[in-house]
Image (cartoon, rainbow, N blue to C red):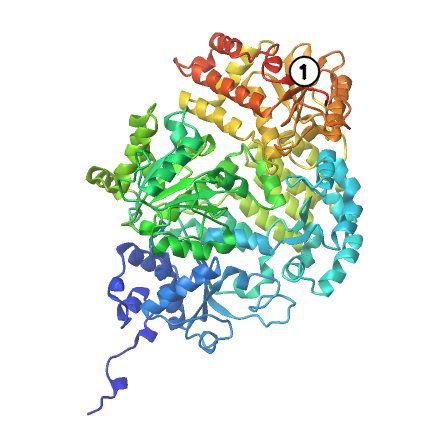
Amino acid sequence: MSLDWNRIGSSSPQLLVQPRDIFAALPNKPFSYSYLRQEQGEVLEGWFARKDVRDVVIKQNTGGGKTVVGLLIAQSTLNEGVGKAVYLAPDTYLAARVREEAQRLGLPTAERHDDPNFLAARATLVTTFQKLINGQSVFGVVGGRHTPLDLGVVVVDDAHAALATTEGQFRLTIPIDHAAYAPLWNLFVNDLVQQNRKAVADISESDVSAAVPVPFWAWASKQDQVWSILQPFAAARDEAFKFAWPLIADCLQLCTVMFSSRGIEIQPPCPPIDKIPSFVGARRRVYLTATLSDDSVLVTNLKADPKNLEHVVTPGSAADLGDRLVLAPVQLNPNLTDDAIRQLAKQFSLGDRDGDGIPETRPVNVVVLVPSGAQAARWRGLADRVHYVGDLEAGVAELRAGHVGLVVLVNKYDGIDLPGTACEMLVIDGIPRPMSAADRREAAALVDSPTRRARDAQRIEQGMGRGVRDVGDHCAVLLLGAGLAMAVHDSTSLELFSPATRAQLVLSRDVAIQLYGQGLDGIRSALSVCLDRHPEWVQRSRFALASVRYRNIGAVRPEAVAAREAFDLAVAGQTSQAADRLQTAINGLTDQALRGWVREQKAGYLHFTNPDIAQQQLGAAIRENPMVLRPTVNVDLRPSRPAAVQARAAAEFLGATYADSTALVLGVRAVLDEIVWDEELTDQAEAAWEKLGLHLGFGSTRPERLYNTGPDNLWTLTPTSNAVIELKTGVELTCTGIAKKDADQLRGGLQWNTDTYGGVTAVPVMVHPVDVYDARAIPVPQMRVITPTKLEEFKTAIIAFATALTQGQNLWREEQAVAQQLAYQRLTGDRIIPAYSVAARLPK
């Protein structure tokens, strides 16, 4: 007898709408998927209750099963008949993993946009964010050749990782060897010189760190010439133009423009996401994110409704996170070097935990995250593999397959799954740095801003999530360098992390307190407790998370909402209203650096209706933040004055900056860590040198940055002497002499000092790899050189100065104690330069 199955049962899985019910009805899912985790079920119920809200954010801890959640939401939307479903992954590797997981569950997916099952709303299209968001998108672009697809739901997986992609997709990058570069350079070079003469010279010398913005008034006034240069390449569908130009051409006059030695970047203040009607018009947009604290970029980049983001869908408990011990070795013992920790990590990768060269325990996979190739080079000789973004897929697969050893991943802090033994020890060796010239400029402008610290905390948390992908997972995490240690040190910093990560950091701090002052043996034993799954540690780790709850309220910064709304007004031709909208945000800001940064944006919109008032706004902005555009009117010269008493000025600065002794040592070390011989970090080195002068009680400024003339740095050493300082930390360590242009630059700084300070004696100082002139250089009388050897001596003395001030109660706040240590370490204004530099020599 044959059965008519159409008459048996009242419904089929394809007609169910509740995600829980869809999952329960899947007939062929493997045993490992026999039931939903509790947190997955809670999230799905939370989404279902809000399914008709257009923008919904779902936050779960890393490894909380977001992929299954996203797939079930997509299937629910299909079953409900709302429309086509798209699941967007950060990259092709992760998109393939999502399709594999869907196949195991028995949920239908498609890989191509023209798949009949996707077009008929019978399968979820799983693809990448880049596939949807680009100027040639097969989903349709306003004015493009593809008809926009009508979508019911777009699920954005790992949304914060996808957002970085969004910015890149809306950025037109013209390489320096492109035919459009030279005419644009010639068109704007005089305007660039007015902004930063030194940076223009550095670009001409192919300095990789040099970048300079085109002032908005020059860009706006020369739009006809710009179009005549760019339009032929766009019309020819030039490779550099075809993906970005269709997205930004209509708002080209509003774009910010950066020149660098690599090329030109042209980018709108916010992505004009309306150019992708399939995404903007989707009935439902669901953002799957880790538990990061700032959702502002969903508004600025994807035009999510900020009111929708006020409520976040989360599980009831935040205990769905694997076990992590997080230690910052320099926080435990300031005498420990990063190289010693690198050796320790290598020993764990070999199973040689006591460092005697004989493996005695199980070797583990150690994964190291670094921000750059230069940082990766510091692991040379220790790394078994070094992977860049292009070869990550094979590297991750190898780690998942078994023991590899110590693996370095360059500039990839998100979008990587390393569960179980794929990564049992994670080392974060530096915070990821912005790659684009515009992002680097913003980072420099907001370097000490709470906004920047919050972004750094997000990047650190993303990185720490790579090694823990499941509630049963575990990973020991080491944070290298004082900067990272500072980021997890005090309660203010801890508030920037998610509740679960914060609980783990507090628990780890309890361990760290007992290790304080110990050497490598103490760190080694603590790491072993985590890796060996010591019962007491596991119990306390679970207990620390048991009562933690998610934040179910979204965090969107008011100035981010204002930036989005202002840009949309400006695109509609209402630039005056755009400026007014930004002013409402400025009125509510207490962060001075951020106020100046937003005021520059306001001036850019105001220029279209009132150029004179725009320049006045820019003048106000530069007083709040010296890193903004230089206005056409001269910036008031404010000569730096020497402190009446150096020790008193130092004590006041240190007391106002550091709340406790650990923060003092970490803060000083973090400043010194920025002064390195790295051609990509010259601007950071100059900023750190300015901070260093303030730590020591000197008047300290960056005249070249402030006034577009003068030296890199100026320290007012005494009432009668200034140190005129040029930093050449970007020069190759293998160079053989001080170049003529560098000597000439210092000579120009001396003349500026004479013009500005009259009879004050100038002490010429250059931070340079060698102390001998090139044969073509014209010597600078009395020039002193801080060589690598002298720089290390200098750093050692400053660390000793700071450490000594922690040996008593608040000694760093007391003028007498500070004076004693300044004198002992030869850091007083009359002794510091002779002690830590050598006289420049003529070539033999």
Which residue is situated farthest in the bottom direction here? 1
Given residues 302 and 355, the one toward you in this image is 355
> According to the image, label 1 marks what residue?
722
> Does residue 305 appear in the picture of this structure?
no
- The three-letter amino acid code for the residue at tag 1 is Asn
Given residues 415 and 727, the one toward you in this image is 727
Residue 446 occupies quadrant:
top right
Who's the residue at 72% across and 22% down the image? 844
Given residues 841 and 522, the one toward you in this image is 841
Q: Position of residue 505 (x, y in %)?
A: 34, 36
Given residues 371 and 662, the one toward you in this image is 371
> Does residue 780 appear in the picture of this structure?
yes
Who's the residue at 27% across and 60% down the image? 36
Reply above or below: 289 against 706: below
Quadrant where the N terminus is found in the figure: bottom left
**Label 1 element class:** strand
Tell me: 230 left or right of 39: right
Q: Position of residue 356 (x, y in %)?
A: 31, 33
Q: Position of residue 123 (x, y in %)?
A: 42, 73
- For mark 1, does the 10 Å Cα neighbourhood hold few (<14), some (14 to 19), or many (20 or more) residues? many
Q: Position of residue 456 (x, y in %)?
A: 48, 39
Residue 692 occupies quadrant:
top right
Who's the residue at 58% across and 35% down the image? 678
Tell me: 585 left or right of 250: left
